[in-house]
Image (tube, rainbow, N blue to C red):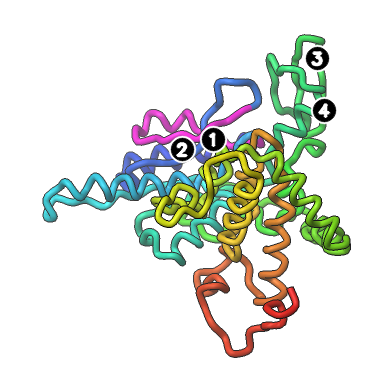
Amino acid sequence: MENVQKKLREEAKNLLEEGKVDVIVGYEQGTLPLTATPCFISDPLEAEKLVWNAFCVQNLAKYVHDVIFLHRESQKRVKPEDRKKKVVGVVARGCTTRSLLIHLQERQYDRSEVFVIGVPCTGYVDKKKQSALLEGEEVLEGVLANSELQVKTASGDRKVALAEVLADNCLTCRFNNPLISDLMIGEAAPPMDADREFEAVDAFEKLPIEERWAYFTKEMAKCIRCYACRNACPSCYCKICFVEQTQPRWVGIGEDETDTQVFQLMRLYHMVGRCVDCGSCIAVCPMGVDLRKFLKKLDKDDLEMFDHRAGTSLDSPAPLSTYRENDREDFIFNP
């Protein structure tokens, strides 16, 4: 990872100096130990801030979309002959490139507006797992060395194997290397244990429908509708979300549990053929709602019913935006 990080900084500096990109969206060291946070670099001298490690969590495709659209809005106040295109460079792992591909498929921006700096990924740290293993103790200092977290807490020094705190979506990731890139940094990462990708879904499907519904209602009861999952998701980019519409009003603003369930159900179905299993929604959820189980169920159905994988090819549009005469329709009558 150190070699990748060094090369990343060098290439980012060159790209900015040569004017190939106007800004680079990447990660920098966080203010807390064992954290990284998204950053936006337009000065070549600031390229040294870039980091690439197991603490880089957020799917940066979200920010690429926002930067491009904010620039477009600003250009509306400029004379047509003076308007400029903004090229956004982005540090992208496999799941990030899948989200970028979805944006391109959905014609959110042109391919020439994004410069993809591909990086190999071996997974990122799940903060909830880390906290559980450290029994909730605050990390005062910490480093990642020899595939283990070496941390200092109020009660003393601790060591945690990196494999024990990797996010579940990373452990079974099938696309941990970039699917598209304009510049690839480092060697391709070894494959993860993708054969177990749908294990949890398979077990869930075998439960009686009453138990499945009970699990759904239990998980949704945790939701406080802070909308962090929506705000972090790279596939949620509507200018006005349905939960904020008043004409018509889809979801109430009170504490009725059915309103929360409707919000989550509608958002889940907006993700059909569009979720890349990046884990951003789970990472930011303050209540630990198990969104992934339901998203992976839709992912499995997408694969089995339509032979489709979200964001794996520009030539493979989302199943709900296309029509084929041989589409399976039995799910309509026998859900």
Instruction: Locate residue 28, reporting x and y percent.
Output: 52, 30
| Residue 286 among magenta residues | no
Label 3 environment density (alpha carbons within 10 Å; few <14, some 14–19, many ≥20): few
* Closer to the camera in the image, 140 or 50: 140
Marks 1/4: CA–CA distance? 31 Å
Find residue 6 and name its label.
1
Instruction: Locate residue 109, reporting x and y percent.
Output: 37, 59
Marks 1/2: CA–CA distance? 6 Å
Marks 3/4: CA–CA distance? 13 Å
Quick one: quadrant of the N terminus? top right
Question: What kind of element bears circle 3?
Answer: strand
Question: What kind of element bears circle 4?
Answer: helix
Marks 3/2: CA–CA distance? 35 Å
- What residue is at 36 percent from the left and 61 percent from the top? 110
Quick one: quadrant of the C terminus? bottom right
Question: What kind of element bears circle 1?
Answer: helix
Image-based side of 315 in relation to 140, left or right: left
Label 1 environment density (alpha carbons within 10 Å; few <14, some 14–19, many ≥20): some
* Highlighted range, magenta: 35-54
Marks 4/2: CA–CA distance? 36 Å
Depicted 112 relative to depicted 234: above or below: below
Residue, disc 3: 157
Kind of residue sitting beneath label 3: Asp
Image-based side of 105 in relation to 73, left or right: right
**Front label number (3 vs 4):** 4
